[in-house]
Image (cartoon, rainbow, N blue to C red):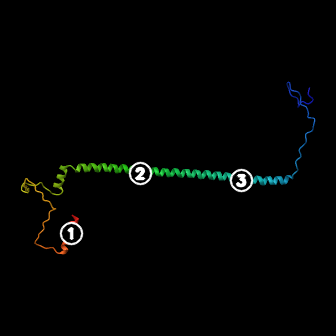
Amino acid sequence: MAYNSRYYQYETSPRKLEPEYERPKRTYPKKSTAKTQRTTRKEQAKKVKKMQRKAILYIAICFISLFVISYRYSVIDNTYAKLKDKKTELATIEKETTQLEASIESSINLTKIEQDAKDILGMQKLSPEQKIYVTLPKTDHIESSSEEIKSSDLKPNWIMEIINKIVESFK
């Protein structure tokens, strides 16, 4: 069987063979451990500071965005409150207008007007002695105003002629 139990594989697998060549060992340059630890500590401190700055920046951005969103909602809430106030004001004004329209319609009633005239103004209905009847002729005569009566007795002076011409031009 196998000469080394660590390389033995069970079942039908053959045993592993050692390579015929030697693998070259990698050689790394030696560095002093004190310097690398110092530089790595400094680098780690820089990385930590950089990560802290990023975290603070992300927190600040989140805070500002949440503040903007809450401010926007407060502005929207204020506008809705104003809108609600205006709607209630409109409803009260419409109610007042309907009441005024009803009072105007009730005041237009002729019997109410007559009663107010008697009570408030002290008016009375005409008595038959106060009534005067006028009789007009059955025919109607219309006179035109375009006719002018000129008297030939008077001789108009030159100023009157100018005034007459101006008056005739406006007719």
> Does residue 111 appear to the left or right of 35 in the view shown?
left
Label drawn at residue 50 = 3
Residue 139 position within the rendered picture, expressed as x and y whole percent measured from the top left: 8, 53
Label 2, label 3: how many angstroms apart (C-alpha)? 52 Å
Q: Locate the C terminus by quadrant.
A: bottom left
User: What amino acid does circle 3 point to?
Assistant: Lys
Please report contact status of discs 1 and 2: CB closer than 8 Å, yes or no.
no
- Cα distance between the residues tagged 3 and 1: 105 Å
Residue 145, given in percent of the width and then of the height, sits at 15, 61
- Which one is in front in this view, the residue at disc 1 or the one at disc 2? 1
Q: Name the residue at the top extreme.
A: 12
Residue closer to the observer: 87 or 45: 87
For residue 152, the mark is: none
Q: What's under tag 1, amino acid-wise?
A: Lys
Sooner in the amino-acid sequence: mark 1 or mark 2: 2
Q: Position of residue 162 (x, y in %)?
A: 21, 72
Image label count: 3
For residue 115, above or below residue 162: above
x 19%, y 72%: residue: 161
User: Mark 2 = which residue?
Assistant: 85
In the picture, measured across the screen, residue 97 lies left or right of residue 165, that is right
Please name the residue shown 34% across and 51% down the image: 93
Q: Nearer the viewer, residue 154 or 73?
A: 154
Q: CA distance from mark 1 to mark 2?
A: 70 Å
Identify the residue position indicated by label 1 in the image: 165
* First in residue order: circle 3 vs circle 1: 3
Q: Residues within 10 Å of mark 1 (few under 14, many from 20)?
A: few
**In this picture, residue 52 sits left or right of residue 35:** left
Task: Judge whether 21 appears above or below 108 on screen.
Answer: above
Q: Tell me which corner region of the image, top left, top right, bottom left or bottom right, holds residue 53.
A: bottom right
Give the residue type that dot 2 points to: Asp
